[in-house]
Amino acid sequence: MCFCSRGIVNKDSSYITSISLLNNSTIAGIEGFLTKHCRFLTVFIDDVKYFFTIFKEFLNIIRLMSYYISLQKIIDFRKNLHRFPELSGSERDTQKRIMKFLDNLNPDEFILNIGGYGLAYIYDSGKQGPVLLFRTDVDALPIQESNSIEYISEVDHVAHLCGHDGHIAILCGFANIVNESRPDKGKLVLLFQPAEETGKGAKSVINDSKFHKIKPDISIALHNLPGFKLNTVYSRDLAFASASTGFILKLKGLSSHAAYPENGNNPDRCIAELIERYNTISSEIKFDDFVLITIIHIKLGEVAFGTCPGEAILMLTIRSYLNTDMIILKQNLESITEQICNSHSIKFSYEYTEDFPASINDNQCVKILRTVCGENNIEYVDLEAPFRWSEDFGHFSQISKSLLFGIGSGIEHPQLHNENYDFPDEIIQTGINVFNGIYKKYLQNNE
Ligand SMILES: [Zn+2]
Ligand SMILES: [Zn+2]
């Protein structure tokens, strides 16, 4: 008798039992997985002394099969989420899908509709210890997907092109582990956060009265990173992702006949001067670290050839590695705007939108991340500089210690928000392992 990937077989090759409960594609998948990942076992038990060895290996194969099947289940779930993406603030069905996928969980507390269509599963040991919060984003983007995959988005001009479908899958995989291995101390919160892309979700979760009793000591999140080595983990001490905010400036002069511009006050020269000065702020003012102003939109008057315009709108995105520099940047932006508009006798008003604070890592958390990666044979790299992009996870940095890290999606992988981007399923297990490793360090006794 021997074990093979199709079941237990007699010496004459007739089956004693087969893995008949599984369909053919699952069996083919398991075969591929076993051939690739585990020593293939062919042991004859002519002698009873081998029985226990064989039994142990058989259990191992069963364990690997169940691991493979549950990972496959998570990947299938990710693809299903990809098929039905929802925009920031409208994640109603995504919420339902997550709840359905996790209906086997038995948390000590469950919070529905936190900060919009958010969800929180809470495991409370009832003992002293830190409150650890793991957060995933759940929203998609208003972009038409151009992939040729069988699970392509079925929603016009909406797609999961930032990989939040994959981030959800990772947190769900981790949730299933936690459910079987609850915290020995402290409290664990699994948060599915809506509306990350607009920068509103984290804030509305934190401001939700249901969140007040959670009070995390440490908040943790990840993002996949195209252009970086597949399955390598990246992070750094202090700033990980930049602070950024949108600046909307409305200008009001006086319209006139296009033939007599001198009878009005066209804001065109005011705009030209503003742009000139905005572009030199970073070199004129002393900042502690990198700052950037990007002009993203200008509208002057209307398409009316007989009219010299009297109104304009100018929009910028401003960024900084440090929250302190963001304050200085805003002050300078406002004073320069006031000074130039006044010199052109142009009335003005402004507002900020899509406010993302910088995501600042706690150095002790980064140290634990490095240890966890080492223990799990996952390559870890310290980033030289923070990312210029922002994450609304920065709001969690302001209310607790926090850790944001990236997992490489592959050097050649299409970039986030590209129309041909798709989350790489190969990094799901790495994400689960890192989350689980950090969790065990903080909330389990044997670590
Ligand atoms: Zn994004
Ligand atoms: Zn994202």
Image (cartoon, grey):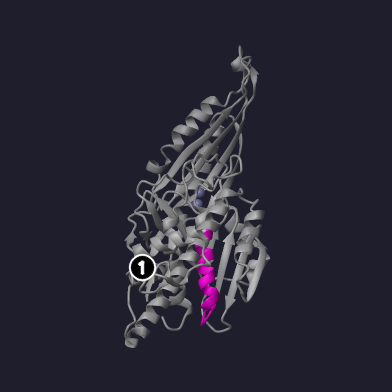
Q: Tag 1: residue type?
A: Cys
Residue 68 is left or right of residue 110, and the answer is: left
Please state which of residues 217 and 226 is positioned toward the viewer in this rendering. 226
Q: Is residue 2 magenta?
A: no
Q: Residue lying at the far bottom in this picture: please name it.
A: 49
Q: Is residue 158 above or below residue 216?
A: above
Q: Residue lying at the far top in this picture: please name it.
A: 259
Cβ of mark 1 under 8 Å from ligand 2: the answer is: no
Q: Is residue 410 above or below residue 3?
A: above
Q: Is residue 282 above or below residue 33?
A: above
Residue 104 is left or right of residue 356, and the answer is: right
SS under mark 1? helix
* Magenta residues, start to end: 168-187
Name the residue located 49 percent from the left edge and 33 percent from the top edge. Answer: 274
Name the residue located 36 percent from the left edge and 84 percent from the top edge. Answer: 51
Quarter residue 127 falls in? bottom right
x, y percentage for residue 164? 52, 54
x, y percentage for residue 364? 40, 71
Tell me the crowding category of disc 1: few under 14, some 14 to 19, or many 20 or more residues within 10 angstroms, Cα based. Answer: many
Q: Is residue 179 magenta?
A: yes
The answer to whether any part of residue 395 appears in the image is: no
x, y percentage for residue 293? 45, 41
Please state which of residues 7 and 199 is positioned toward the viewer in this rendering. 7
Image quadrant containing the C terminus: bottom left
The answer to whether any part of residue 285 appears in the image is: yes
Residue 437 is left or right of residue 335, and the answer is: left
x, y percentage for residue 427? 42, 58
Q: Which residue is mark 1?
A: 373
Name the residue located 60 percent from the left edge and 23 percent from the top edge. Answer: 265
Q: Residue lying at the far front in this picture: please name it.
A: 12
Quarter residue 373 falls in? bottom left
